[in-house]
Amino acid sequence: MTIDAHSHLWLKQDTTVDGQPIRQLQPNRSRSLFFGEERQMLPPFMIDGVNSAEVFLSNMDYAQVGAAVVVQEVIDGNQNEYLAKVQQQYPNRFFCMGMAWNLEEAKAVREAGLKGIAFPGHRMHDSLHTLMPIFKMMEGEGMVLSMCLGDNERQIAEMREIIQECPELKVAIGHFGMVTTPSFKSQVMLARCGRNVMIESGGITWLYNSEFYPYPSAIRSIKEAAEWVGMERLMWGSDYPRTITAITYKMSYDFIIKTKELNEQDKAMFLGENAVQFYGFKHLPELPYIKNMSE
């Protein structure tokens, strides 16, 4: 079973980050104003600007992806209310994470039924240590931390200290450790700092977008990371929906299935087995392959 460890959902993009507006553009609502530039934020057929669970489930069923972890990013605005509804409606298909910046907000996320909290650390200016009360609460409540880090050795060092301070906290490091930057190895090696730390590949096709499908350098990076920390610490993630403006959802993982550089056991662990164990997914659906009309 394939599990997506990094995806996004939102009802509407309308927020401000560092004084810059991020919002949907009319009349083409699949595009957004992003830090002063027009960007194709969604596939062009998603014309209402809504990145819904139902559309994602259709993609997941087609691609035979059993479940997905939904994280949050400040560029999408706070989606806690919507994701709480998604978690309640589709408990076996989604593992939804909230957004919080203080202890009171973190407790509200937990009370809403969300299973973790996601932090886009790469967009933070303050020390990660300011979030320690939240991390301690999450550790006690059994919540999962999703953390994306920038190419910043100071921030990576802070994350290392947090992992050591909160040994029972489950931590998923996103964007495959910013694989195309100098911080790649430092981020991946965080998985050696605690028994509950994983590295997920959400955004790897974005980071290797200039190379494009079938991403041979991404395969080499997965093998390299496995040599450093073991394949059992690595998970596949798509970064849906932004990555499928360039490729289909299925293409975001089938380059791994088709490669001859990884054995079948490594593929199974990376694409789903590790995530099932880490996030505790149960009652996953059986999703048979459905032939295309073009076949």
Image (spheres, rainbow, N blue to C red):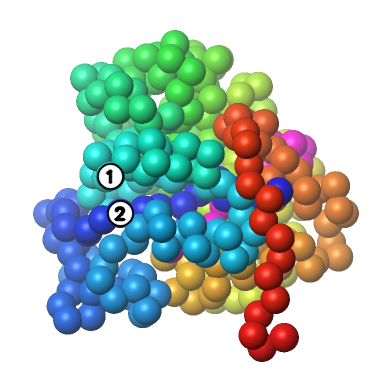
The foreground one among 213 and 193 is 213
Q: Residue at x 78, y 48 (%)?
A: 268
Q: For mark 1, what is the residue?
A: 82
The amino acid marked with disc number 1 is Tyr
User: Is 127 colored magenta in this rendering?
Assistant: no
Asked if marks 2 and 1 touch (Cβ < 8 Å), the reply is yes
The amino acid marked with disc number 2 is Trp
Specify start and end residues of the magenta stretch as a single range.
230-241
- Relative to 23, does residue 177 appear above or below in the rendering? above
Q: Residue at x 19, y 61 (%)?
A: 22
| Image-quadrant location for residue 51 | bottom left
Q: For mark 2, what is the residue?
A: 10
Looking at the image, the residue that sits furthest to the top is: 140
User: Is 239 colored magenta in this rendering?
Assistant: yes
Residue 92 appears anywhere in the view: yes
Left-right relation of 244 to 61: left
Q: Quadrant of the C terminus?
A: bottom right
The foreground one among 23 and 288 is 288
Looking at the image, the residue that sits furthest to the bottom is: 294
| Image-quadrant location for residue 49 | bottom left
Q: Position of residue 234 (x, y in %)?
A: 67, 42
Q: Earlier in the sequence, mark 2 or mark 1?
A: 2
Q: Residue at x 52, y 30 (%)?
A: 171
Q: Position of residue 26 (x, y in %)?
A: 15, 78
The secondary structure type at the circle numbered 1 is helix
Dot 1 surroundings within 10 Å: few (below 14), some, or many (20 or more)? some
Residue 131 appears anywhere in the view: no
